[in-house]
Amino acid sequence: MLIGATLAILVVMILAIIRGIIGPTLYDRILAVNMFGTKTVLLIALLGFVMGRPEFLDIAIVYALINFITVVGVLRYSDSFAFKQPAEKKQPEES
Amino acid sequence: MDVAIEIMSAICLLIGSFLCISGGVGILRFPDFYTRMHAVGVTDTLGAGMILIGLMLQSQDILIIAKLVMVLLMTLFINPTASHALAKAAIHNGLKPVLGNKECNHTESESSSR
Amino acid sequence: MRHAIYLFLTLTAFWLLNSGHFSALMLSLGLGSILLVLFIAHRMDVVDHESQLVHLSPKLPSYFFWLLKELILANISVVKHIWLGNHSISPALTTVKASQKTDVGKVIYANSITLTPGTITVDLVGDRITVHALSQDNIQALETGEMDRRVSQVVN
C-alpha cells in the first residue's frame, strides 16, 4: 500500500508538471510549482517509510519550508514588469 | 503489528491517494486559474492529511509521530498563506476570474484565460 | 521581555523535538542557534504580543474539530465537482464582512476560509474579505456567518 501511495503521488506530480508546461498564465505555472513542492514533501515522507529510514522526515520538514519561501519570494516580484505584461495585453486599462 | 491498525492505515493511504489524484485531475480540468486553486486546496488539506495519518498509524516511535504531526501542521498553516499571496497577486495584476453567474457575465466580453 | 522568554521556550521545545541528540556539543550548538534566531527576531522587531498565542488556547481545540468537520464536507463537495466536470461549477466572487476586532482574529478567519477547499480569500481590506468560491453553495454557507461567529468566540 505504501508503494501504491508513492506511485499515486508520482502520478499527481506528473499532472502538476503538465499544467506547469501548458499553463496559459504565469500564475498557473506558480500554482503548479507550489503543488509540485507540496507533493514532494509527501513523496519524501512516503519514501522514507518505503525504504525503512524514517529519518527522511527531517528533509521533508526542510523542504516544506523551502517551498513556502520559494513561492512567497517569487511573488515578492509580482509588481514588476513581467508579471503585469500578460494581463495588460488582453485587458485594456480600466482604472 | 496489529492487523486492524494495518488495515486502517491502508484505508487512510487509499483515501489520501484518491484525493490527491482527484486534485491532480482537477488542476488539469478546471477552466481558469482561480478554480484550479480550489483543486490544489483538496490535495493540500485532506489528501496530505490522510496520507500522513496513514503513515502515523504505521510507526511506533513517538519521535517519528511527532515529526509527522509537525509536517501536517506546517502544511496546514503554510499552504493557505501561499495560496492567499498567489490569489492576491493575481487579482491585483488584473487577472479576471471566470464567473459562472449569468448576471455577472454580461459585463465582461471575454475571460482572461482561454 | 516576557514575549522573548515565551519565544525562547517555544524554540527550545521545537529544537529538542527535532534533534533527538543530547550530547553536550549538540546542546550548545542548539543553544547558539536559538539565541541567533532570538537576536534576528529582536532586530526585525517582531517580538510582540502576536508572536505568542497562548491566551487563545482554551477554546481552540473545539474550533479545530469544527473546522475539521467543515474541511471534510468541503473536500467531498469539491471532489464531486471535479469528477462531474466543468458544467457543474459556477464560480463566484463575493465580499463578506469580518466582525473580529483584532488582526489575529481576522487572520485566523481569512486563513480558515482559504483552508476550506471551495473558498479562497482573495483580498482583505479593513474588515471586508473578498472571497472567490467554486459554487453558490459555498457562498451561502459562508454568508450564514457561522465560521465568523466561531472565530470571534475563539479570539475574544
Image: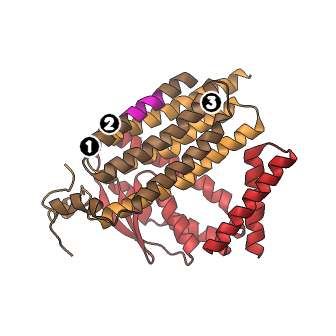
Label 1 – label 3 distance at C-alpha: 37 Å
Looking at the image, residue C67 lies above or below residue C40: above
Give the SS element for disc 2: helix
Which of C74 and C22 lies nearest the eye of the viewer? C22
Q: Chain of mark 2?
A: A
Question: Which disc number belongs to residue B38?
Answer: none
The residue located at (50%, 53%) in the rendering is A68
N-terminal-most mark, 3 or 2: 2
Instruction: Please state the horizontal and vertical placement of residue C18, each as a whole percent of the image.
Output: 72, 46
Give the SS element for disc 1: helix
The residue pinned by badge 3 equals A48
Label 3–label 2 contact, CB within 8 A? no
Label 3 – label 2 distance at C-alpha: 26 Å
**Type of amino acid at the residue the image marks with label 3:** Gly
Q: Which residues are magenta?
A: A8-14
The residue pinned by badge 1 equals C86
Chain depicted in orange: B
Which corner quadrant of the image does residue C10 belong to?
bottom right
Residue C120, visible in the rendered structure: no
Label 1–label 2 contact, CB within 8 A? no
Residue B13, visible in the rendered structure: yes
Which of C29 and C97 lies nearest the eye of the viewer? C29
Give the SS element for disc 3: helix
Which of A1 and C92 lies nearest the eye of the viewer? A1
Which corner quadrant of the image does residue B110 belong to?
bottom left
Where is the C terminus of chain C found, in terms of image quarters? bottom right
The residue located at (42%, 35%) in the rendering is A13
The residue pinned by badge 2 equals A18
Image colour assigned to chain A = brown
**Type of amino acid at the residue the image marks with label 1:** Asn
Looking at the image, residue A57 lies above or below residue C109: above
Total count of labels = 3
